[in-house]
Amino acid sequence: MPIWTPSMISSIMAYAIHVACSFCNIFVSRGVDERKIQDCTRGIHGNADLGKLWPPAECDQKRSCCYPTTGKPALDFGIHGLWPNYNNGSYPSNCNRTAPYDETQIEDLISSMQENWPTLACPTNNGTRFWSHEWDKHGTCSLSTLDEHSYFKAALTLKEKVNLLSVLEDAGIEPGGFYSLEAIKEAIKNGTGHEAAIQCNKDAFGNNQLYQVYLCVDKYGTDLIDCPILPKRKCNETIEFATFGPETFTKEGSFSALQLSCADSSLTVLHPIDF
Ligand SMILES: *[C@@H]1O[C@H](CO)[C@@H](O)[C@H](O)[C@H]1NC(C)=O
Ligand SMILES: *[C@@H]1O[C@H](CO)[C@@H](O)[C@H](O)[C@H]1NC(C)=O
Ligand SMILES: *[C@@H]1O[C@H](CO)[C@@H](O)[C@H](O)[C@H]1NC(C)=O
Ligand SMILES: *[C@@H]1O[C@H](CO)[C@@H](O)[C@H](O)[C@H]1NC(C)=O
Ligand SMILES: *[C@@H]1O[C@H](CO)[C@@H](O)[C@H](O)[C@H]1NC(C)=O
């Protein structure tokens, strides 16, 4: 499923002279962490924080996360971001302040973004803040190969192409179960042809769970590549592949009371990433 027609490629190549970044990585994430649910009951923080409430990348333990105004995301991986990287694995940020996020350029992609790139920031919002953050901070760094529309389109197409959920399900790895980290890695390698970095966090019961999958992509955002540098993250040997939703909050625990206030309004929470 090629994204680029030959004529698009040649016009992009013409701009490639100033390419700063040699590859991108795509993050997809899932995960529930009840430690932040408590914040939900307290309501949302002061305005001072608003500018920083970028989920899921910057949902830290002091911030709660909420489903977007467009509703609870599907039980699927969501895109976190497509990040241009240097070959050494570090990444530039905020590369072009004269090309800020402009939603009018991606109107045709919004409904797909709502579905596949859902925000989890509080207060509940429509996603614009998350997407504009990803574009301003990361997207502008691949501007020489991907304009704004191409950038978002590339991430959406990659997510669809990779289809991580079915890759895992094809290997018998289903939401709600515990699996060996090795089995998950093998399944992704088998299903995508490339090794992924797996990031875990802890669920409400302290279990290690699959949180983010990191895969590398060529600088045009077209195809997966082997990561030049694969970040090493700690996960336990056995990890949970969690499901979203109230069922996660039904066991005993301090959050059972919070379920009344939060689970019912479809709250979910993601943990910070720090790749
Ligand atoms: C990675 O490479 C970039 C571009 O060459 C450079 O600016 C940056 O300092 C490097 N970072 C590290 C940690 O080596
Ligand atoms: C920054 O963005 C502006 C507006 O899109 C563009 O004209 C300019 O070439 C960009 N600069 C770089 C270094 O990419
Ligand atoms: C989201 O809401 C903001 C105002 O808060 C608005 O400017 C923007 O167009 C909205 N975006 C979408 C995709 O609904
Ligand atoms: C490997 O992937 C194929 C599909 O590409 C699938 O049919 C098979 O079950 C997978 N095997 C394992 C061990 O994941
Ligand atoms: C990870 O495994 C260690 C050793 O088995 C165990 O002590 C620890 O509780 C586990 N951590 C999580 C978060 O599951």
Image (tube, helix red, strand yellow):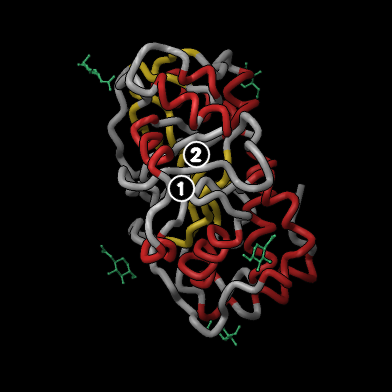
Q: Position of residue 99 (x, y in %)?
A: 57, 80
Within 10 Å of disc 2 (Cα), the crowding (few <14, some 14-19, many 20+) is many
Q: Quadrant of residue 254?
A: top left
Identified at 41% across, 22% down, the residue is: 257
The answer to whether one can see residue 65 in this image is: yes
Q: Is residue 209 above or below residue 17?
A: above
Q: CA distance from mark 2 to mark 1?
A: 8 Å
Identified at 67% across, 51% down, the residue is: 113
Q: Does label 2 or label 1 sit earlier along the sequence? A: 2
Q: Position of residue 232 (x, y in %)?
A: 30, 39
Q: Tell me the element at label 2.
A: strand
Between residue 70 and residue 47, name the one nearer to us: 47
Q: Which residue is mark 2?
A: 29
Q: Position of residue 200 (x, y in %)?
A: 36, 32
Relative placement, left or right, of 174 versus 40 is right
Residues at marks 2 and 1 touching, judged by CB atoms closer than 8 Å: yes
Within 10 Å of disc 1 (Cα), the crowding (few <14, some 14-19, many 20+) is many
